[in-house]
């Protein structure tokens, strides 16, 4: 019989999506992959400043929100002062995973100057702070390309060690490109076995000039049990 090791503080959150494995199943193999990803980012951090890391993908539905949400929770669990900003003002993903779907105020309200930044910051599990999208916007690229967005990220740099941005897909709209301009590093999420190589290349070309630091493959769960079995035998 398996036992679940979750922090009791998690119980105070009315909704946490089952995909938040680093919160709900922190000792499981899926959470281990996010810890590994965080460790790899840390290794890059030892060589260059990497406080603001943005996640995008060529197409919709490749796993950006799931990846960045778990990574941010993992960072917070490790004691880093961390904030996750849902910059997808068309289809907010990470806001939904933490139960802050379409609950203003959020990023849209900050950028429309309806509220000060502190009013839109929510507390998530493991000490993670979040700025949900709050609501969708008519012209996200305009908001994300604004001086106010840059100022927001600068403000967050002063208060948090790690800042994660959940961006929309890279190819369909300008939103991701303009938002990624404020990041120290951009990660391209790629759905393994689904997104064709030329599409990924197209997205990487579209982001040339921006600091793309690597790709994360999603949808390749098989590798984990295989390697675990290897270690169990040795
Ligand atoms: N590592 C993964 N392995 C397998 N499936 C995954 C993984 N990460 C996410 N998924 C699945 O992919 C789908 C899309 O996930 P998610 O919402 O995180 O993607 P997204 O890229 O943020 O989508 P959108 O473009 O709509 O913002 C979900 O059904 C999710 O369960
Ligand atoms: Mg998403």
Image: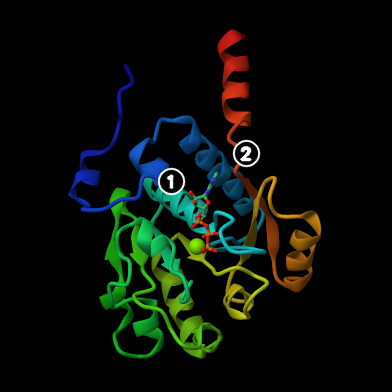
Q: Which residue is mark 2?
A: 220
Q: Residue at (41%, 79%) from the top-left corner?
A: 136
Q: Residue at (48%, 82%) from the top-left corner?
A: 149
Query: Quarter-wise, where is residue 37 in the image?
Result: top right
Query: Quarter-wise, where is residue 5 in the image?
Result: top left
Name above or below for residue 193 compared with residue 65: above
Query: Quarter-wise, where is residue 22 in the image?
Result: top left
Badge nearest the viewer, 2 or 1: 2
Q: In the image, 152: left or right of 227?
A: left
**Dot 1 lies on which element?**
helix
Q: Residue at (36%, 83%) from the top-left corner?
A: 110
Of 215 and 161, nearer the camera is 215
Disc sitting over residue 74 in the figure: 1
- Quick one: label 2, few (<14), some, or many (20+) residues within 10 Å? few
Q: Quadrant of the N terminus?
A: top left
Image coordinates for residue 155, horizontal then vertical, percent: 42, 77
Mark 2 within 8 Å of ligand 1, using the beta carbon: yes
Q: In the image, 197: left or right of 6?
A: right
Is residue 78 visible to us here?
no
Q: Earlier in the sequence, mark 2 or mark 1?
A: 1
Q: Quadrant of the C terminus?
A: top right
Of 15 and 86, nearer the camera is 15
Color encoding of the figure = rainbow
Kindly give the residue lying farthest to the top in the view shown. 233
- Quick one: label 1, few (<14), some, or many (20+) residues within 10 Å? many
**Dot 2 lies on which element?**
loop
Image coordinates for residue 144, horizontal then vertical, percent: 52, 82
Image coordinates for residue 63, horizontal then vertical, percent: 55, 54
Mark 2–mark 1 distance (CA, rounded to whole Å): 20 Å
Image coordinates for residue 196, horizontal then vertical, percent: 76, 55
Q: In the image, 49: left or right of 148?
A: right
């Amino acid at each position: 019989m398996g036992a679940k090791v979750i922090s009791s503080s998690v119980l105070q959150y009315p909704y946490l999506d089952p995909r938040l494995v680093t919160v709900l199943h922190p000792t499981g193999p899926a959470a281990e992959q996010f810890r590994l990803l965080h460790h790899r980012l840390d290794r890059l951090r030892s060589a260059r400043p990497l406080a603001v890391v943005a996640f995008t993908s060529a197409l919709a539905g490749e796993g950006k929100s799931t990846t960045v949400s778990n990574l941010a929770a993992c960072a917070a669990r490790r004691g880093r002062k961390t904030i996750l900003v849902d910059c997808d003002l068309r289809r907010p993903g990470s806001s939904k995973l933490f139960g802050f779907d379409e609950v203003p105020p959020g990023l849209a309200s900050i950028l429309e100057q309806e509220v000060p930044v502190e009013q839109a910051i929510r507390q998530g599990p493991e000490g993670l702070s979040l700025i949900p999208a709050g609501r969708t916007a008519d012209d996200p690229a305009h908001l994300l390309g604004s001086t106010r967005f840059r100022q927001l990220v600068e403000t967050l740099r002063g208060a948090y060690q790690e800042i994660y941005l959940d961006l929309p897909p890279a190819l369909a709209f300008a939103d991701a490109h303009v938002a990624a301009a404020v990041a120290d590093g951009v990660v391209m999420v790629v759905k393994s076995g689904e997104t064709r190589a030329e599409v990924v290349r197209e997205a990487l070309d579209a982001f040339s000039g921006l600091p793309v630091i690597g790709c994360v493959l999603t949808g390749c769960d098989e590798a984990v049990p295989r390697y675990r079995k290897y270690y169990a035998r040795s």
